[in-house]
Image (tube, rainbow, N blue to C red):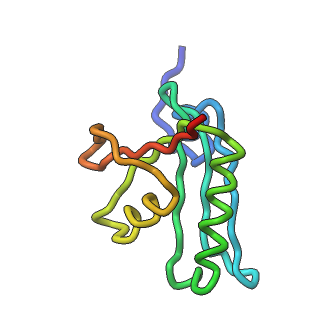
Amino acid sequence: MRVEVVPATSADVLAFCAPERPVYQMLTVDGVPAAVGALYTAYGRTWAFLDVKADAIGAARARLVRALYRALLDHGGPVYVLCDADRYVTAERLLDVLRFSPTNETHDGKRIWVWQTWA
């Protein structure tokens, strides 16, 4: 049996950490990437990931929020996110607009938020 330590690619990490690979989607503004996001399953929960280039989003901010909300409605809940409010100062405001709620859970000092549909 041969055991080695080798460099991991992004695909290796995704396959190992999130067997149900995320399907990333890109939001572009006039052909320029402005945001990337995904929904994926890990640890028995559906998680969302979003990274927005604030300088590229500009006037498309409202469209981004509507597109994100539609994606959440299409998926159904609950959907969890890990909020890095220290790094992204507007993250909590965006989560609030999208109707996420903070939980009592944290991971690495970051608050976990949840979005749910209510019947």
Most extreme residue toward the front is: 119
Q: Is 101 on the left or on the right of 109, as rendered?
A: right
The answer to which image quadrant residue 26 occupies is bottom right
The quadrant the C terminus occupies is top right
Look at the picture and state if 66 lies above or below 19.
below
Residue 36 horizontal/vertical position (percent): 61, 62
Residue 68 horizontal/vertical position (percent): 63, 59
Give 72 or 17, whichever is nearer the viewer. Answer: 72
Give 87 or 6, whichever is nearer the viewer. Answer: 87
Give 56 or 112, whichever is nearer the viewer. Answer: 112
Give 3 or 66, whichever is nearer the viewer. Answer: 66
Q: Residue at x 53, y 58 (%)?
A: 50
Look at the picture and state if 27 lies above or below 13.
below
Residue 62 horizontal/vertical position (percent): 61, 75
The quadrant the N terminus occupies is top right
Q: Residue at x 56, y 38 (%)?
A: 118
Q: How many marks?
A: 0
The answer to which image quadrant residue 12 occupies is top right
